[in-house]
Image (cartoon, grey):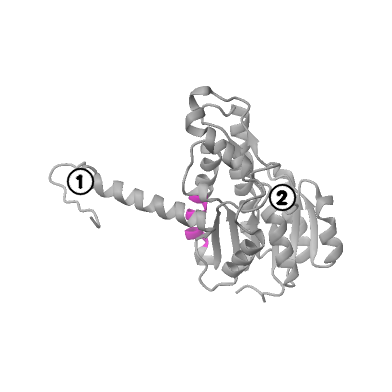
Amino acid sequence: MANSSQTRVWLITGSSTGFGRTLAEAVLDQGETVVLTARKPQQVEDLTAKFPGRTLAGRLDVTNPTEVREVVKQAIATFGRIDVLVNNAGYGTLGAIEEVSDEDIRRQFDTNVFGALDLTRAVLPHLRQQRSGHIINFSSVGGFVSFPGSGIYCSTKFALEGISEALAQEVAPFGIKVIIVEPGAFRTDFSGRSLVVSDTQIADYEPVIGQYRQWVQDIDGQQQGDPKKAASAIIQAVNSENPPLRLTLGADAVNAIDAKLKSVKAELDAWRQVAVDTAFEGVTVSAIGG
């Protein structure tokens, strides 16, 4: 471990609401230090007042490279290190692939993918120098299973998972751990204030995504997942000697991912011979399993 669990420094994006806020409170309650970042830092002033000396509030829009560099610089200048980076800032977009505007697609990727990537790349030199640390990337069950009506959102989380999977292998020699968090439906404002619903709604898609669109909006405030328990699970993973690459949270997420794995395996087996028969004649090939 880097330094004692009592003195770790966490940098959490999107600290003003949702998972970011709940995780920040849990980390502070157990005596650790948090760099709280939000587009409106005044929204975390109550935490800086309650935990003076163990908090730093920084203005951060993750799509602004200048603010990304500045908040990392402030964190290092104030606390001398960063031990846990939590890329939590993000939001969802609802609509069929054909319905979502170019602008909404690019904004979704700018926040959920490029924002997390930019911050990760800014923090990595410090973690490498320390030869320790954790990077926690908030994905979703939608980062493993894509749903009609959420294709744009899910694609950003699929991208983040691809980045994280490679990154975990790249930084393992330096004692840096990467954890992908895959929550199902939790009682945050993800389905409420944070959700962007496409202005365009094409009638042909209504039978396909209409019910899902309604469910995502109706579930707001009724989700089974408890963010406080999710925060505890994340802290438990960070404290673990062998943290998981993927930390799935919620029975709904576990069930959806389990079903996807079975479906992929069944399809792979059904088309296995077609797959292996694509080699040049005379080349010896084999496929594991069957």
> In which quadrant of the rendered view does residue 24 lie?
bottom right
| Residue located at (24% from left, 46% from top) | 270
| Residue located at (35% from left, 53% from top) | 262
Q: Is residue 1 visible?
A: yes
Closer to the N terminus: mark 1 or mark 2? 2
- Under tag 1, what secondary structure? helix
Q: Position of residue 119 (x, y in %)?
A: 65, 51
Q: Which residue is mark 1?
A: 273
Q: Position of residue 72 (x, y in %)?
A: 72, 55
The amino acid on which the numbered mark 1 sits, given as a three-letter code, is: Gln
Dot 2 crowding, Cα within 10 Å, few <14, some 14–19, many 20+: some
Q: CA distance from mark 1 to mark 2?
A: 51 Å
Q: Give the number of the mark in front: 1 or 2.
A: 1
Residue 264 belongs to the span the image colors magenta: no
Dot 1 crowding, Cα within 10 Å, few <14, some 14–19, many 20+: few
Residue 163 belongs to the span the image colors magenta: yes
The label on residue 220 is none
Residue at the limit of the structure toward the top, as seen here: 203
The amino acid on which the numbered mark 2 sits, given as a three-letter code, is: Arg
Q: Position of residue 77 (x, y in %)?
A: 78, 61
Is 147 or 36 nearer to us in this picture?
147
- The answer to the question of whether label 1 and label 2 lie on touching residues, with beta carbons closer than 8 A, is no
Is 227 or 5 nearer to us in this picture?
227
The label on residue 69 is 2
Q: Which residues are magenta?
A: 161-171
Is 128 or 99 nearer to us in this picture?
99
Q: In the shown orientation, is residue 14 left or right of residue 53? A: left
Q: In the shown orientation, is residue 173 left or right of residue 104? A: left
- Under tag 2, what secondary structure? helix
Query: Quarter holding the N terminus?
Result: bottom right
Q: In the shown orientation, is residue 127 left or right of residue 150? A: right
